[in-house]
Amino acid sequence: MSVFASLVEQLADLLAPLFHASAAAAAIVLFTALVRLLVHPLSRAAARGRKAQAALQPRIADLRKKHAKDPQRLQRAVLELHAEEKVSPLAGCLPSLLQLPAFFLLYHLFSSTSIGGESNGLLDHRLFAAPLGGRWSDALSDGGMFGPAGLVYLGLFALAAAVATVNQLRARRTMARQPAPLPAGDQVPGLGAITRVTPFLSYFTIVTVAVVPLAAALYVVTSTAWSAAEQTLLYR
């Protein structure tokens, strides 16, 4: 973790002439962009997988008619079709999972009072009036919702809500263009639950911003905004 702390400090030093006291916050945004660039090839592969999944829907509909009286046989046939076409029914999960280590690293880095036996100097950095190691509860107790730090969080909440709304609307349009899903008992295991929950996952970022250190909240908001732009380009 000390190596990562040094990386953030070095990035902050490079950005200080432009962002001054908020240079560490800008470094976290830049770090998030670098992580997303590294994961982008997987995001492109996931987009191809989802398009391939959509292309299989007519054949899945045929299987549904063929095995209408045998749900277990239908489920096996759907799985065999995905395996034959080398299409994962859970395409898109891997890019998100690979970002979790970076998020947790930031979370622990800005939750620790010491690093390598020394005081954690990163906790002194701020985004405007809000300390990067602080949480929304700290802002509420120090100036209230409309205090200097509280306004920073209100801005992040507004941005997270806007991105979540864009993601949900796009997901709803995508689902509306697809054929009706298989009955719950005939789907690939777990796919139905993921399909139902996915459009609302972006709103969970608002809760995340409220409970994690501000540095981790910046990572989440930046990453979800990147995802919204990336998916708009990949699925146009």
Image (spheres, rainbow, N blue to C red):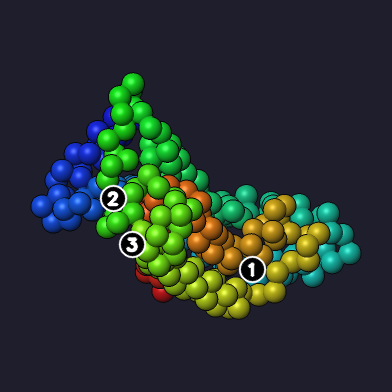
Q: Nearer the viewer, residue 152 or 100?
A: 152
Q: Nearer the viewer, residue 221 or 151?
A: 151
In percent of the image, x 70 and y 74: which residue is there? Answer: 180
Q: From what the image shows, is residue 6 above or below residue 226?
A: above
Q: Which of the numbered marks, if any, corresponds to residue 126?
A: 2
* Callout 1 amino acid: Gln
Q: Residues within 10 Å of mark 1 (few under 14, many from 20)?
A: some
Q: From what the image shows, is residue 171 above or below residue 202?
A: below
Give the image location of residue 33, x and y in percent: 30, 53
How many dots with numbers? Answer: 3
Q: Nearer the viewer, residue 172 or 205?
A: 205
Where the C terminus falls, by quadrant?
bottom left
Q: Is residue 149 left or right of residue 18?
A: right
The answer to whether residue 229 is seen in the rendering is yes
* Callout 3 amino acid: Pro
Give the image location of residue 172, x and y in percent: 57, 75
Image-quadrant location for residue 8: top left
Where the N terminus falls, by quadrant?
top left
The secondary element bearing badge 2 is classed as strand
Q: Which of the numbered marks, if any, corresponds to residue 57?
A: 1
In percent of the image, x 33 and y 62: which residue is there? Answer: 148
Q: Which of the numbered marks, if any, corresponds to residue 135?
A: none
Mark 1 vs 3, N-terminal side? 1
Task: Tell me the distance, in whole angstroms, between the alpha carbons under discs 1 and 3.
Answer: 52 Å
Q: Which residue is mark 3?
A: 148
Q: Is residue 5 left or right of residue 166?
A: left
* Callout 2 amino acid: Arg
Mark 3 vs 2, N-terminal side? 2
Q: From what the image shows, is residue 12 above or below residue 155?
A: above
The secondary element bearing badge 1 is classed as helix
